[in-house]
Image (tube, rainbow, N blue to C red):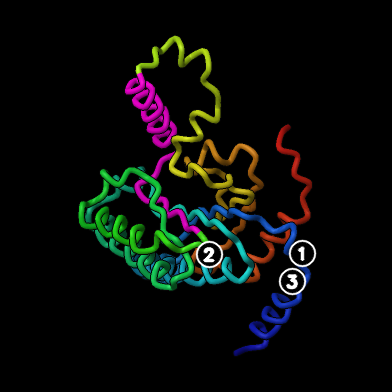
Amino acid sequence: MGLRDLLYGAYGRRLERSLDPDVLPRHVGIILDGNRRWAKAFGASSSHGHRAGADKVLEVMGWCADEGIEVVTLYLLSTDNLSRPADELEPLIGIVQDAVARVAATGRWKVHPVGALDLLPEPTAGRLRELAERTAGITTGVVNVAIGYGGRQEIAAAVRSLLLEHAERGTSLTDLAEVLDVEHIAAHLYTKGQPDPDLVIRTSGEQRLSGFLLWQTAHSEFFFTEVLWPAFRKVDFLRALRSYAARERRYGV
C-alpha cells in the first residue's frame, strides 16, 4: 500500500466519523456510469469494464450496509441499453445478472427487480425472479435492481395498472378522473411502499437522470462526481453522504 492509499484511508476514516447517523439518507439511488470509458482508458474491452463495474457494485453495497442505509436503487441496465449490439449486450446482461446474485448471496439485501422483465431474455428474467423470491424474507435492507428500466415506461405502466384495477372494480373513467391524485399513481410504481430516494449519486461526470426514477426523484438531492464507476472509492461515497447531510432539504422550489 502506497502513501497515497494511506492518506486516503486516514481521510476516509475521519470523514466517516464526522457523519451524523441521524441525517444520513434512508434511500440512495445510484446511476452507475463510466464502465466503458474506464475500460477504454486501459485499452481493455467493454466487457472488462462491465466486470469491474460489477465488482464495484458488491463493494458499494457493503458501504451502504456499513452506513445503515435501508434502501438502495441501482440503475444497472436501461431500456435504451437493450438496443446495444448483441456482442456487447449478451455478456453485459450476464455480468449484471451475476452482480445481482452476488449481492443476494450476502444475505443482507432483499432483491427487488424494477423494470420490464419481459424485455429481458427469459433465463435472466427467471433468475431475477428467483433471487427476489429467495431473499423475500430479508428485513435488513432492500436493493432495487433497475434492469430493463425506463422512467417513462414505469409511469406508463403504473397508469395502465391503475386503469385496469379500476376497470375490474367497475369504476368509470369519469369517476376515476374526479378523484385521481398522485398517490393513486404512486401506489402502482415499481417502488410502491418504499420511501422515495433522498439522494441520487451519478458517476462519470454526466449531470442528467437518463430516465432514472423520474417520478420518485421529484424532491431528491443529487450528487454528481467525475469519477468513473469502476474507480469509485469509499471516500467518494462518503463525500456524497457528507454533501447530502450539509444540505437543507426544502421539498419544493
> Is label 3 in a helix, a strand or a loop?
helix
**Looking at the image, is mark 2 or mark 1 nearer the viewer?**
2
Is residue 33 at all visible to an observer of this figure?
A: no
Q: Nearer the viewer, residue 196 or 175?
A: 175
Instruction: Return the x and y of residue 57 as percentages of the image width and height.
Output: 47, 66
Q: x and y percent of residue 64 in the render?
A: 58, 66
Residue nearest the observer in this picture, 99 or 179: 179
Does the magenta-highlighted stretch encompass residue 62?
no
Look at the image and give the residue range highlighted in magenta: 142-169
Say above or below: 66 vs 246: below
Look at discs 3 and 2 and give the one toward the viewer: 2
Which residue is situated farthest in the top direction here?
Answer: 174
Residue under label 2, please give it: 140
Give whichever of 99, 49 is nearer the camera.
99
Q: Which residue is denoted by mark 1 in the rendering?
A: 20
State which tag comes first along the sequence, 3 or 2: 3
The kind of residue tagged 2 is: Thr
* Direction from residue 148 to residue 17 in the image, left or right: right
Is residue 30 shown above or below 58?
above
How many angstroms separate mark 2 from mark 1 (CA)?
20 Å
Which residue position is annotated with label 3?
15
- Image quarter (top left, top right, bottom left or bottom right) of the C terminus: top right
Q: Main secondary structure of the magenta part?
A: helix
Q: In the rendered view, does 120 fall on the left or right side of 17? A: left
What's the amino acid at mark 1?
Asp
Nearest to N terminus: mark 2 or mark 1: 1
* Residue 196 percent location from the top left of the image: 58, 45
Query: Mark 2: which secondary structure?
Result: loop
Q: Residue furthest bottom?
A: 1
